[in-house]
Each structure stands twice: as structure tokens, then as C-alpha cells.
Image: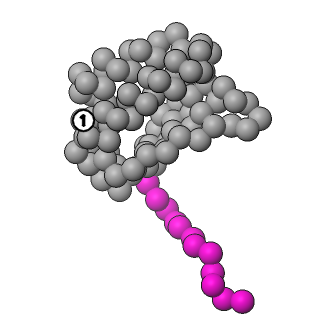
């Protein structure tokens, strides 16, 4: 499993960004290897969003983003987003809350 983390700073209409992002998410949810997704929004900088998506493999993610379906949708973000910063990460360690008192 790999995790995509992408910080996006919206420079255009936040409402338009959210509309396009929703379309992209709907498309990606249907792609082979897709496991899950969430979007976070900064409380101190409301124009900054972070996308977190989990994929079975880097290859599955690569195939999805190289597809014409993705490319045609992501082009709609031109002029809305400055400097997206996507990267894939692998889990090094995890921790869960302990139930011990």
C-alpha cells in the first residue's frame, strides 16, 4: 500500500476548486487499486487543502493519473491551484491508542 499526500493552495475560486476536486475524486474512486481518500482544509489558511489517498501500489496510482480520464479532469484545475505538491509515501510505522490504564 502507498499513500498519496498532495498539498494544494487554491488561488482561484474555492467553490470551483471544490467542484472540480469532487469530480476528480469520483473518477479516482472507480480506478483499479484505489483504497480510500480524504481531503483536509487548513483552519488557519482556508485556501490550503491536503489530499490523502491510499492505493494498493504506486503502479496503480500511476496508471490512474496517466489516464486520459484523469488528465482531462485535472486540466480544469489550471488557474485555480498554485503549486500542487503531490508525492507517494510508504508506511514506516503506525501506532494506535493504548487501552491500558
Vertical comparison of 54 with 46: above or below: below
Q: Residue at x 32, y 41 (%)?
A: 29
Q: Residue at x 34, y 52 (%)?
A: 35
Tally of numbered tags: 1
Q: Is residue 45 left or right of residue 63?
A: right
Report if residue 79 lies within the magenta region.
no
**Which residue is outermost to the bottom?**
101
Could you tell me residue 70's position as x and y percent?
Answer: 30, 26
Q: Is residue 90 visible?
A: yes
Q: Residue at x 61, y 24 (%)?
A: 9
The residue indicated by pointer 1 is: 63
Could you tell me residue 22's position as x and y percent?
Answer: 43, 31
- Magenta: predominant secondary structure element? loop
**Which residue is outermost to the right?**
44
Q: Residues within 10 Å of mark 1 (few under 14, many from 20)?
A: few
**Which residue is outermost to the top?**
79
Q: Quadrant of the N terminus?
A: bottom left
Q: Secondary structure at mark 1?
A: helix
Could you tell me residue 66's position as x and y percent?
Answer: 27, 28
For residue 72, which quarter of the picture?
A: top left
- Magenta stretch, residue numbers: 90-101
Q: Is residue 62 visible?
A: no
Vertical comparison of 44 with 79: above or below: below
For residue 67, which quarter of the picture?
A: top left
Vertical comparison of 56 with 61: above or below: below
Could you tell me residue 16's position as x and y percent?
Answer: 52, 18
For residue 42, which quarter of the picture?
A: top right
Q: Quadrant of the C terminus?
A: bottom right
Amino acid at each position: 500500500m502507498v499513500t498519496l499526500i498532495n498539498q494544494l493552495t487554491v488561488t482561484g475560486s474555492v467553490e470551483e476548486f471544490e467542484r472540480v476536486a469532487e469530480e476528480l475524486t469520483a473518477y479516482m474512486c472507480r480506478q483499479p487499486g484505489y483504497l480510500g481518500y480524504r481531503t483536509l482544509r487548513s483552519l488557519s489558511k482556508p485556501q490550503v487543502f491536503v489530499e490523502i489517498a491510499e492505493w494498493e501500489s504506486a503502479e496503480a496510482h500511476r496508471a490512474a493519473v496517466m489516464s486520459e480520464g484523469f488528465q482531462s479532469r485535472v486540466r480544469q484545475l489550471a488557474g485555480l491551484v498554485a503549486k500542487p505538491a503531490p508525492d507517494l509515501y510508504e508506511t514506516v510505522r503506525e501506532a494506535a491508542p493504548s487501552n491500558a490504564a
